[in-house]
Image (tube, rainbow, N blue to C red):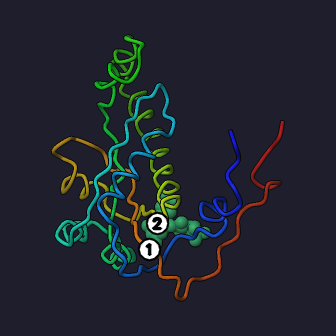
Amino acid sequence: MTPVDDNALDSLFRQARTPQRWTDQPVPQNLLQDLYDLVKLGPTSGNCQPARFVFLTTDDAKQRLRPALSAGNIEKAMTAPVVVIVAHDPLFFEQLGQLNPEPALRDWFAADVGLSEETALRNGTLAGGFLILAARALGLDALPMSGFDQMAVENTFLSTWNWRANFLVCLGHADPTDMPPRAARLTFEEACQVL
Ligand SMILES: Cc1cc2nc3c(=O)[nH]c(=O)nc-3n(C[C@H](O)[C@H](O)[C@H](O)COP(=O)(O)O)c2cc1C
């Protein structure tokens, strides 16, 4: 693989921050398609692809989210052009027939709820991470949020498909006003072991 250039590393990691507030610049609908078309290419175990995404783009949809949000997240989410519910389908294995040539895989997951739930959560969370980086690669800023009532979000938005809510990602263009300095990160020595 060819390494990406320094500008790309800045956009994806070094200069990218989690926004506290947003500009008025909208996020066009076609960018959501472009975003998913990148996210779906990220790896998942056995190509199981359990992640599901619900894009809240209208004021009406975002107002339905409001009662589920922690107090500190209301303003940040309500002013974001788009809020994505990063979810997963606990019955993801029903689609494995079209995603993986191994016919026994569906039955392994269907027979073991612990394994299928762990697999859905692990790979769904990964896809949420891919979403954050893909959004940055497309010139958007992303604010992930776990401060919300999971059951309320599932009841309000996900019950049609029985999907489970994992976390939210607000998308838009950051207003950098009053942005605090970046908090410290653990050093290589603190966080890593090389064996
Ligand atoms: C899984 C997850 C959940 C988060 N939940 C919240 C949240 O509920 N509210 C909030 O304001 N920020 C939330 N954040 C944002 C983090 O605090 C922020 O990304 C982190 O401090 C790094 O900030 P930086 O990108 O500016 O360095 C969350 C981030 C992640 C990854």
46 and 154: which is toward the camera = 46
Q: Residues within 10 Å of mark 2 (few under 14, many from 20)?
A: some
Q: Horizontally, is 181 left or right of 164 in the view? A: right
Could you say where residue 122 lies in the image, as x and y percent from the top left? 48, 39
Label 2 sits on residue: 140
Could you say where residue 167 lies in the image, as x and y percent from the top left? 39, 55
Instruction: Tell me whether the residue at label 1 lies in contact with that at label 2, contact meaning CB atoms closer than 8 angstroms.
Output: yes
Q: Horizontally, is 58 left or right of 31 in the view? A: left
Checking the image for residue 173, the label placed there is 1
Rendered position, 126 above or below 97: below
Rendered position, 60 above or below 157: below
Could you say where residue 6 lies in the image, as x and y percent from the top left? 71, 61
For label 2, the SS is: loop
Q: Horizontally, is 124 left or right of 52 in the view? A: right
Checking the image for residue 35, the label placed there is none
**Which residue corresponds to the image point at 33% horizontal and 71% vertical from the top-left?**
81
Residue 70 in which image quadrant = bottom left
Quadrant, the N terminus: top right
Q: Earlier in the sequence, mark 1 or mark 2?
A: 2
Rendered position, 120 above or below 103: below
**Which residue corresponds to the image point at 34% horizontal and 56% vertical from the top-left?**
32
Quadrant, the C terminus: top right
Could you say where residue 191 lies in the image, as x and y percent from the top left? 75, 52
Rendered position, 27 above or below 9: below
122 and 80: which is toward the camera = 80
Q: Amino acid at mark 2?
A: Leu
Q: Residues within 10 Å of mark 1 (few under 14, many from 20)?
A: many
**Which residue corresponds to the image point at 40% horizontal and 61% vertical from the top-left?**
169
For label 1, the SS is: loop
52 and 16: which is toward the camera = 16
Is ligand 1 closer than 8 angstroms to the Cβ of mark 2?
Answer: no
Q: Amino acid at mark 1?
A: His
